[in-house]
Image: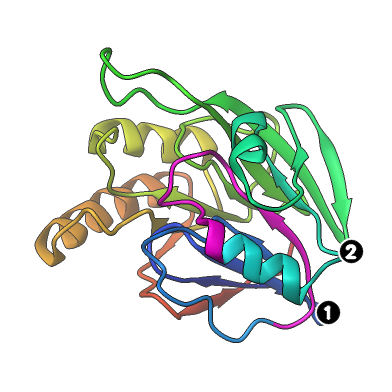
Amino acid sequence: MRVTKHEHAFLTIERDGETLVVDPGAFTAELGALENVVGVVVTHEHPDHWTPDHLRRLAEAFPDAPILTTAATAAAAPVEATIVSPGDAVTVGSFALRFFGGTHNEIHSSLPLVDNVGVLVDDAVYYPGDSYAVPEGVDVALLAAPIGAPWLKIGEAMDFVLAVAPRAAFGTHDVPLSDVGLGMHRQRLAWATEQGGGTFHELAPGESIDIAP
């Protein structure tokens, strides 16, 4: 299985000629060349995780690929989308997906909380969206860990990585950080990953990691 980090929160997961798209948002100008997309996951409604244009392009190019997301995102999307909730299990192509969490991490008490779903792919790759929802009882092979956001305190992000204890991890959701800030936060998440015996990978946009579930 190959996991590729793109700009900000956009990920692609490829296996056996099939592709799963996750959070194609506003900080990704172009989706690039995608092949045989069998499903799209949008973790929540914020525009840095999806855009109408990106979803239209995906729906037009891959009409049989379901778009799985929260109720609020489905209502706002310009194309048909399927609502998923924490506890749901869905198969798209040959990918087995399980959903966790339920609520976006708080930015500030003055701002309303929104629904958010973390996604576990083939019981191996976990991306929590904008939350610290832990997939309890799962041996996570690879964690896509949020590393920079208005809602993120690095100490809490470290505690999240410690709780998941993945075998490998990399940072995502990184556009808000400067180069200096990104380096500092990577060091902190690398330390947290290593406490559970895992390896932290510094992936830049377009770089991939191959894992065996």
Seen in the picture, residue 158 relative to 181 is either above or below; the reply is above
Give yes or no for contact between labels 1 and 2 (Cβ–Cβ under 8 Å). yes
Foreground: 160 or 96? 96
Residue type at numbered disc 2: Ser
Seen in the picture, residue 51 relative to 135 is either above or below; the reply is below
Direction bottom: furthest residue:
33
Read off the magenta span: 35-53
Name the residue carrying label 2.
94
Q: Looking at the image, which residue is at 43% across and 20% down?
A: 113
Direction top: furthest residue:
109
Q: Looking at the image, which residue is at 73% across and 46% down?
A: 68
Q: Secondary structure at mark 2?
A: loop
Q: Is residue 28 left or right of residue 148?
A: right
Name the residue carrying label 1.
16
Q: Looking at the image, which residue is at 25% across and 33% down?
A: 155
Can residue 204 be seen here? The reply is yes
Image quadrant occupied by the C terminus: bottom right
In the rendering, at what x and y percent does residue 165 appear?
52, 42
Seen in the picture, residue 93 relative to 204 is either above or below; the reply is above
Q: Is residue 127 left or right of residue 68?
A: left
Can residue 1 be seen here? The reply is no
